[in-house]
Image (cartoon, rainbow, N blue to C red):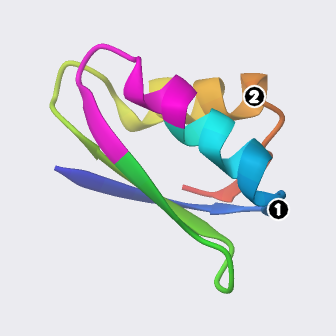
Amino acid sequence: MYSTFTISKTQCMTCNNQVLKSLGMLQGVFGAEIETIDGCITVNHTDEITRDEIAVKLDELGWKVIEN
């Protein structure tokens, strides 16, 4: 399944890659994609992890979720 989150801002490519790598290490996450123009991140995941758990991880990584 895919979950899309609107975030407050995207970072530089290095920071974006760190976030993608950290998300990819979560159990149940297959990958993620950042849309820098739209300020969205889409996460491909199983039901092993919830949208809320992903939102918490994004917050821990310094990405404020505006809408999920």
3D distance between C-alphas at marks 1 and 2 = 13 Å
Q: Residue at x 75, y 47 (%)?
A: 14
Kindly state the secondary structure of the residue where label 2 is placed: loop
Which residue is more in the foreground, 20 or 65? 20
Q: Is residue 12 magenta?
A: no
- Specify few, some or many for label 1: CA neighbours under 10 Å numbering under 14, 14-19, or 20 or more: some
Q: Residue at x 51, y 31 (%)?
A: 21
Tag shown at residue 61: 2
Kindly state the secondary structure of the residue where label 1 is placed: loop
Where residue 34 appears, as percent x and y from the top left, is 54, 63
Q: Is residue 30 magenta?
A: yes
- Residue 8's place in the image compared with 14, above or below, is below
Residue 2 in the figure: left or right of residue 54? left
Q: Amino acid at mark 1?
A: Ser
Asked whether the beta carbons under mark 1 and mark 2 sit within 8 Å of each other, the answer is no
Q: Residue furthest front?
A: 14
Where residue 6 appears, as percent x and y from the top left, is 63, 65
**What range of the chain is rendered magenta?**
21-31
Residue 44 in the figure: left or right of residue 14? left
Residue 29 in sight: yes
Tag shown at residue 37: none
Residue 65 in sight: no
What residue did someone put label 1 on?
8
Indicate which label's residue lies in the foreground, 1 or 2. 2
- Residue 23's place in the image compared with 17, above or below, is above
Where residue 67 appears, as percent x and y from the top left, is 63, 61
Q: Residue at x 55, y 25 (%)?
A: 22
Q: Amino acid at mark 2?
A: Leu
- Specify few, some or many for label 2: CA neighbours under 10 Å numbering under 14, 14-19, or 20 or more: some
Residue 36 found in image quarter: bottom right
Q: Residue at x 35, y 54 (%)?
A: 3
